[in-house]
Amino acid sequence: MQVSISQFADKLMDIIPVIADEFVQRHSRAFYECKITFPQAVVLHYIYKSGEAKMSEMAKYIKVTQAAMTGVVTRLVKGNYVLRVYDPKDRRIIKIKLTDKGAKTIEKMQEQKKEMIMHLFGKVSAKDRDDYLRILSSIRDILMKEKTEFKQDA
C-alpha cells in the first residue's frame, strides 16, 4: 500500500514518539543503576567521544546555558565521573575529562544500549535491518547537508 507524503508524515508522527519513549524507558535502567541523569549521561557520552571538552562546547551541544552546564558538571565532579582540568597558560580555560569511573560508566551504558538494540532488532529480518540502516543513513546525510547549508546561509 502506497501512502501519500502527508499520510506518511502522520504515521511517522505516531510511531517515532513511541519508539523514542520505549528506548528511553528501557535505557533508563542504566541511568538508575549508575545514579546519573539523562543530561549527565549525554555530557559523559560527549566527553567520551571527544576525549575532553570545554564547558562552552558542551553547553552548545546540549543547548543549555553555561550556568546550567556548570551545574551538570559540578554534580558529575562530585560523583567522581569527571575532572576539571585548568589550562596552565590560561586559568580561565577549563576542560572537562572523564575519570576512570566516568569512562566505565559510559562504557557500561553503551553496552546495555547495544544489548537492547540487538534484542529488538534480532526480532526483524536481516533485510529489514539493512533497509532500516540505509534509510536512517540517508536521512542523517540529508540532515547534515541541510545543517551545513543553513550555517552557510546564516
Image (cartoon, helix red, strand yellow):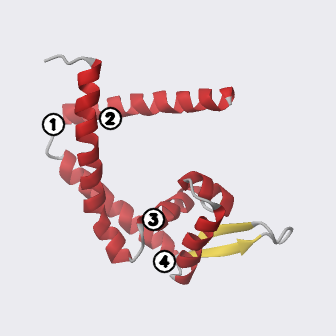
Q: Which of marks 3 and 4 is nearer the N terminus?
A: 3
* Mark 2 Cα-neighbour bin, 10 Å: few <14, some 14–19, many ≥20: few
The Cα atoms of the two marked residues, 4 and 2, are separated by 32 Å
Label 4: how many Cα within 10 Å (few below 14, some 14–19, many 20+): few
Q: Which of marks 4 and 2 is nearer the N terminus?
A: 4
The residue indicated by pointer 1 is 125
Q: How crowded is mark 1: few (under 14 residues within 10 Å), some or many (20 or more)?
A: few
Query: Would residue 119 be found to the left or right of residue 58 on screen?
Result: left
The answer to which of marks 4 and 1 sits earlier in the sequence is: 4
| Residue 9 placement: quadrant | top left
* Callout in the foreground (3, 2): 3
Q: Position of residue 1 (x, y in %)?
A: 13, 18
- Name the mark on residue 133: 2
Task: Please tell me which residue is depicted at 47% across the width and 27% down the height of the picture.
Answer: 142
Q: In this view, does 56 lie above or below 12?
A: below
Reading the chain from its start, which is encountered first: label 3 or label 1?
3
Q: Residue 8 carries which label?
A: none
Residue 101's disc is 4
Q: What element carries label 4?
A: helix
Q: Where is residue 52 in the image (x, y as percent from the top left)?
A: 63, 62
Mark 3 vs 1: CB contact within 8 A: no
Q: Is mark 1 on a helix, strand or loop?
A: loop
Residue where numbered disc 3 is placed:
41
Rounded to the nearest angstrom, the CA distance separating label 3 from label 2 is 25 Å
The amino acid sitting under disc 3 is Ala
Kind of residue sitting beneath label 2: Leu
Q: How far apart are marks 4 and 1 (CA)?
A: 37 Å
Position of 74 relative to 129 (above/below): below
Cα separation, mark 3 vs mark 4, equals 13 Å
User: Which of the marked residues, 3 or 2, is nearer the chain's N terminus?
Assistant: 3
Q: Label 3: few (<14), some or many (≥20) within 10 Å?
A: many
